[in-house]
Image (cartoon, grey):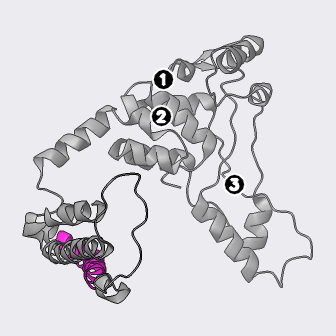
Amino acid sequence: DEDCRAAFIAQQIARIFERLPTAYLFAGDITAGQPYLHKDDLVDAVVRTVDRRAELPAETVLLIGEEDTPSYEEMQKRIGRLIHGEDWRTLVLPKQLTKLGAWVQTEVLDQDTDIKPWMIENSDDHYEIDISRAKTLLGWAPRHSLLDTLPEMIRRLNQDPTDWYAANKLDPPVVAASDPEIEQAERRLKGPLERSKEDVEAAIKRHRSRTLWAPMTNAALGLWLATSPMTVGLFDPVAAAIPPALGHAIAEPQFRNAGLGVSEIVSGLLVTVFALMGMFRRWRWAQWVAASLGLW
């Protein structure tokens, strides 16, 4: 389609776009090519087949695709003109040398390559298909052609290289610093902000409203902590004997319990106060105070 989404074509375009050394090389007959089919034409053929299923034989073999098959050389030149404004020169290499280069790239240099050995073996194959049965039985013919769709593919590539690479399952970071991406970034910097200050403030308020449960939970825990001394009886009289302390003086149990109770009450009240204060944006520092009190 207009975003390409055809692996071999996308890789060919990417090599020329990046001016990779492999973009200038080919192993095989550069006058050979393979037919392609636009996605919309494929859908049209399927719809026509379903609509005419009662009229078609029980078993029917149909070939669908473009009748005119552009050669690899023609594709190279057309892509080169569209991207760089120049006729792309392509050198033909012996197949054995190409296989050796692919092996060195993958096995020695440990680099990924989109050129596989089976591609090199089949690089001389040229296909042209006869769609006369599809025309006769379905009344179908392709309404798109690869060469006519290429300009729109390249336009979308130049408009946003990283998105185009991602859509075609290539590596977007490779083109993140390309000229179109830099120009796009410069245009964004010169233009207005994507979101106004009011939009940002509204987004912050919405976020805070969705997270108010956290300080409210802390406030509830603070109240529980403040009331826990009464519920566990820390201020009740203690009649237990004082355990031995190896010669160290130990305060009476009721004093120790009272001190612990006062500490929990004060801590709980402070946690509650600072948790509630932290609900307001101007006192957001209070959240850190509440967290520190919790650790203490």
Q: Where is residue 255 in the image (x, y as percent from the top left)?
A: 25, 73
Estimate the x, y position of residue 113 in percent, counting from the top left: 63, 27
Q: Which of marks 2 and 1 is nearer the N terminus?
A: 2
**Residue 112 lies within the magenta run:** no
In the rendered structure, which amino acid carries the disc numbered 2?
Answer: Ile
Q: Label 3's element? A: loop
Residue located beneath label 2 in the image:
79
Foreground of the two, 222 or 4 = 222
Q: Where is residue 31 in the image (x, y as percent from the top left)?
A: 67, 27
**Range shown magenta:** 203-227
Report helix, strand or loop for mark 2. Answer: helix
Badge 2 vs badge 1, beta-carbon distance below 8 Å:
yes
Query: Which of the labelled discs sits on residue 88, or is there none?
Result: 1
Relative to 48, say whether 181 is above or below: above
207 in the magenta segment: yes
* Mark 3 lies on residue: 65
Residue 178 in view here: yes
Q: In which quarter of the image is residue 277?
A: bottom left
Q: Nearer the viewer, mark 2 or mark 3?
A: 2
Q: Is residue 236 left or right of residue 109?
A: left
Q: Whole-Å distance between the Cαs marked 2 and 3?
A: 21 Å
User: Quadrant location of residue 38?
Assistant: bottom right
* Residue drawn where x is 70% and y is 31% of the image: 32
* Residue 35 vertical position relative to residue 80 in the rendered view, above or below: below
As helix, strand or loop, the secondary structure at mark 1 comes to: loop
- Quarter of the C terminus within the rendering: bottom left
Q: How crowded is mark 1: few (under 14 residues within 10 Å), some or many (20 or more)?
A: some
The residue depicted at 19 percent of the width and 69 percent of the height is: 204
Tag 1: amino acid = Trp
- Against 63, residue 119 (above or below) is above
Instruction: Answer left or right for 251 relative to 17.
Output: left
